[in-house]
Image (cartoon, helix red, strand yellow):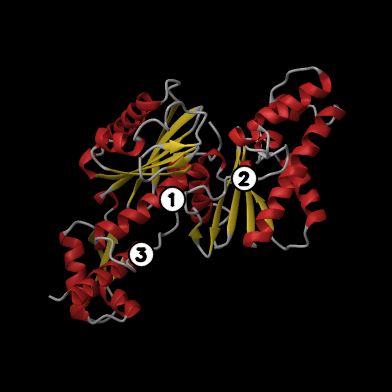
Amino acid sequence: MTEAANNIRKLNKCNVFETIAHEGPISRAAIAKRLGLSKQTLSEVAKQLEDEGWVRQVGLNKGSVGRAAMNYEVVPDAAYVAAVDLGGTNVRVAIADLSCTIFGEASEKTNPKGGRDVVEQVATICKSVMEKHNLPTSKLRLVVVGVPGVPDASTGAVRMAPNIAHLDKIDFSGDLRAELGVDVIVENDVNLAVLGEHWGGIGHGFDDIAYIAVGTGIGAGIMVGGELVRGKNGSAGELGYLPFGADPFEEESLRQGALERATATDAIRLHYHELTGKKLDVRDIFDRLETDKNARIVLDRVAREIARACAAIIAITDPEQIIFGGSIGRRIELFERVQTQLALLTSSTTELGISGLGGRAALIGAASLGLSQVHATLLTGGIPGAEISLPPAKLSKLGALVDG
């Protein structure tokens, strides 16, 4: 068989699997009609998928005339992906199967030692979740980890992640791969969050999206034309380094980012302390908005700077939608202020919304990226053009979508 013929066969295999994943249980005849394949070609591809364990036959449909139609559906437990959201405070792990069901979420405090200790912690949680649900580790095919920094593909290190010690000193992806014995993908957590919203959140149906996370820091995940924008060095969307909010030439701005110094957790607490002499948590400052003029001054400033960041994104990428996430970004009090300020800066029709996935957006995005990778590479060897769109995410087994 020539290389071209072999690639066509793989693409047919990819397309058949995608059709079954989206529409199964579905008959062989319906698949052939949908894809324009001959009965012989479809039979050969379906048999290969069945023999390899990716699809299976299910209950037959009996029509009024003729033989019963043979139906196919995806085998959910043919392979699993571990989705990991590694934050400075908590590490979360969930499992996704080939039917796009996400389940088995586990969470614990991130090891403060960082470095190799965090690698071992992530590996241990992944293994324990698999064991708890009686899932064979041999079927774990890929682990996707969201990190609060910039993965360096050349070294495996994670740069610009000050909230987790020593990730920039180790081959994080390589060490985790060695611990688990499976492939590992490391991606910025906010990039994963925009993928999560696009797949299973309010961004579904939009292909030009920006996701802005405001919490301990501030960052954005940007999608243009349905594709994630990473940039040459993976730093696209590092909003904290926009040159406003604070003096961008000061040493602290070079380390932390000028905008982050004016918008994130520490900035809110520091500004309130400068105005009142009192040290309060961000939650307490929000709780005082109705009765405390200084709390309103602090939040109005944050909203103004975030609105400027939104205006910059709109001017560059013209998104259909901007989604706000993070523990601070999802607060309605801030969201409404940003809406008001942004209306003064631009006449854009970009839709603004608050994430409905809460703190799980990055976790769901990790599952999305992992399943897309597994579907394409396992079925086709990753040949060009062999991409499989995912069916809708099944989130019911994750429970209520709230922060933990």
Residue position marked by numbered label 3 in the rendering: 387
Percent of width and height locating residue 61: 28, 70
Q: Could one spot residue 319 in this view of the protein?
A: no
- Where disc 1 sits, the SS reads loop
Mark 2 or mark 1: whose residue is earlier in sequence:
2
Residue type, label 1: Lys
Residue position marked by numbered label 1 in the rendering: 394
Q: Residue at x 68, y 34 (%)?
A: 250
Mark 3 or mark 1: whose residue is earlier in sequence:
3
- Where disc 2 sits, the SS reads helix
Front residue of 388/250: it is 250
Mark 3 or mark 2: whose residue is earlier in sequence:
2
Percent of width and height locating residue 183: 28, 44
The reply to whether the C-beta atoms of the residues labelled 2 and 1 are less than 8 Å apart is: no
Disc 3 crowd, CA 10 A, few/some/many (<14, 14-19, 20+):
some
Above-or-below relation of 391 to 178: below
Disc 1 crowd, CA 10 A, few/some/many (<14, 14-19, 20+):
some
Residue type, label 2: Leu
Percent of width and height locating residue 82: 35, 41
Residue position marked by numbered label 2 in the rendering: 239
Residue type, label 3: Glu
Mark 3 → mark 2, Cα distance in angstroms: 30 Å
The reply to whether the C-beta atoms of the residues labelled 3 and 2 are less than 8 Å apart is: no
Front residue of 294/356: it is 294
Mark 3 → mark 1, Cα distance in angstroms: 20 Å
